[in-house]
Amino acid sequence: NAGVTQTPKFQVLKTGQSMTLQCAQDMNHNSMYWYRQDPGMGLRLIYYSASEGTTDKGEVPNGYNVSRLNKREFSLRLESAAPSQTSVYFCASSVERGTGELFFGEGSRLTVL
Amino acid sequence: AQRVTQPEKLLSVFKGAPVELKCNYSYSGSPELFWYVQYSRQRLQLLLRHISRESIKGFTADLNKGETSFHLKKPFAQEEDSAMYYCALSGFGNEKLTFGTGTRLTIIP
């Protein structure tokens, strides 16, 4: 089992460009999440999806959109990248809402110039 | 609002010495607390949760509701304990897991 797989692992964008981070899990989990990790700020929740077909905003949703394509996949899109979105992005999944046990991907390092 | 505070960004401890990583939280309801760990070149993973009341890799953590704390402890540090540690909180049945800013633990040989 691969667990949670994120692509790409590294990406450099220019301000204003768009891109999509892909995430897939093979554990048949219901809930999926996108976090960003910044120095001194820990992990902050961007969006989450409690189940297929639903998405909700987290702590820092501005500038992002998400799509829960199916049970396995949860993508994060930056429509017009800004330098403030330079960060490491983590996708995670859990069996169901509220369990607290998240399984994380390896992270995607995004730099916006 | 839920908040997790880890006051120490960096902590260095000699091998064999006791370790305590501090975590304080703010939450109006009944909290569920967790410790996550990220070893070098590995994924962030769950270390332990307060509900389980278990010891993992020699680490324990007790939820103190009076002091709103969930400190992580180990009596004798080992070199393989060097890692980044995050304390996290969720409300009962709440999807949102709120993380602290993390503490980087370094064990000095």
Image (spheres, coloured by chain):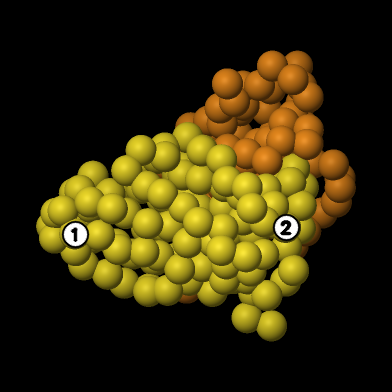
Chain colours: A yellow, B orange
Residue at screen point 59% across, 25% down: B2
Outermost bottom residue? A1
Q: Check the image and report above or below for B39 versus B25.
A: below
* Classed neighbour count for the residue bearing mark 2: other residues with Cα under 10 Å, few (<14), some (14–19), many (≥20): some
Q: Which disc number belongs to residue B91?
A: none
> Quick one: B8 or B50, which is closer to the camera?
B50
Q: Check the image and report above or below for A38 versus B6.
A: below
In the visual, does A7 lie left or right of B57?
Answer: left
Residue wearing tag 1: A17
Q: Which disc number belongs to residue A30?
A: 2
Whole-percent x, y for residue B8 in the image: 47, 38
Q: Secondary structure at mark 1?
A: loop
Specify whether disc 1 shares its chain with disc 2: yes
Q: Chain of mark 1?
A: A
Residue at screen point 67% across, 56% down: A52
In the visual, does A97 lie left or right of A44?
Answer: right
CA distance separating discs 1 and 2? 31 Å
The N terminus of chain B is located in which quarter? top right
In the visual, does A50 lie left or right of B109?
Answer: right
Whole-percent x, y for residue B107 in the image: 52, 60
> Quick one: B25 or B28, which is closer to the camera?
B28
User: Amino acid under label 2?
Assistant: Asn
Residue at screen point 72% across, 57% down: A30
Q: Check the image and report above or below for B20 versus A89.
A: above
Whole-percent x, y for residue A54 in the image: 63, 47
* Classed neighbour count for the residue bearing mark 1: other residues with Cα under 10 Å, few (<14), some (14–19), many (≥20): few
User: Amino acid under label 1?
Assistant: Gln
Residue at screen point 47% across, 35% down: A59
